[in-house]
Image (cartoon, grey):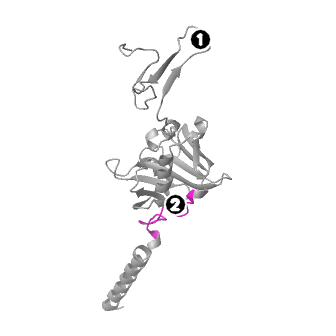
Amino acid sequence: MKSRTVIALWIAALTLGVVACIVQFGGNEDIVAKTNLVPGDKILPKFPIREITKVTIKKEDQSTVLVRIDKDTWGVAERANYPVDYSKLRNLLGALSELEVAQGYPAGPEHMGNFGLASSGDKDSEQGLQVLAEKSNDSNIAHIILGKFSGTNQSAGRFVRTTTDDSGVYAVSETFPGISADPQTWLGRNFLKIEKIKTIAVSAPSDSNFKSWKLIRHPNTDGTVNENGKLKLDGMEDDEVM
């Protein structure tokens, strides 16, 4: 075989090898690891807020269950259905319904702790804050886990994942401020809002040694009740000091 023929065969073989490599490693996008969602996609594309009747927030051994009492009333189950901080709940559900992917990061179960998205583990810093939304028949609407903040400060966004997507984790711009698994943080603050107090009386019928007392408003000059008058001890003269 002539040397020129041998060289031509070698060139042909090398060319075929290069083409094969390009097809296998460069032209086949399926081998590149990627997440199911891309930037701009909604994390929870189907999130019917009006159908939600129960929201559970939990992390490790602490949990809070928020239950819908009627159309516009929610309660904290751990506090005998004491009215919930409705604006806080509304903000949480609204944020979840609008949550969009800023960036996806392919990751397996063994890496979830690095993002603070582990569902269970030894270190608290690796645990995610789980938010579970359910319907009246206890069927699952969404189960999302909130992890570490994605930037150097708490205003830069957060890592999240859902239990139905095992392709990786997602960075989002929402930080979910104030969201906690502590029931105390979900109690409504305006439930016992009392206005225009006229009197305050304190007594202890079961304690014979307790001396009852009463606060009243300083009356108007004509003797009528002054709603804006200062409170004073009933029976105390004007020149006396309490």
Depth check, front residue: 115 or 239: 239
Depth check, front residue: 58 or 48: 48
Element under label 2?
A: loop
Is the stretch drawn in magenta largely helix, strand or loop? loop
The N terminus sits in image quarter: bottom left
Residue 128, percent across and down?
Answer: 48, 46
Q: Which residues are magenta?
A: 31-49
Give the number of the disc on residue 207. Answer: 1
Depth check, front residue: 90 or 217: 217
Q: Residue at x 41, y 57 (%)?
A: 172
Q: Label 2, on which residue? A: 44
The answer to whether residue 29 of the structure is visible from this angle is yes
Q: Residue at x 51, y 53 (%)?
A: 93
Instruction: From the image, state whether disc 1 or disc 2 is nearer to you.
Output: 1
Element under label 1?
A: loop
Instruction: Report crowding for label 2: few under 14, some 14 to 19, many 20 or more residues within 10 A (C-alpha).
Output: some
Q: Earlier in the sequence, mark 1 or mark 2?
A: 2
Q: Is residue 88 above or below residue 102?
A: above
For residue 15, which quarter of the picture?
bottom left
Instruction: Report crowding for label 1: few under 14, some 14 to 19, many 20 or more residues within 10 A (C-alpha).
Output: few
Q: Is residue 214 above or below residue 86?
A: above
Kind of residue sitting beneath label 2: Leu
Residue 130, percent across and down?
Answer: 52, 47
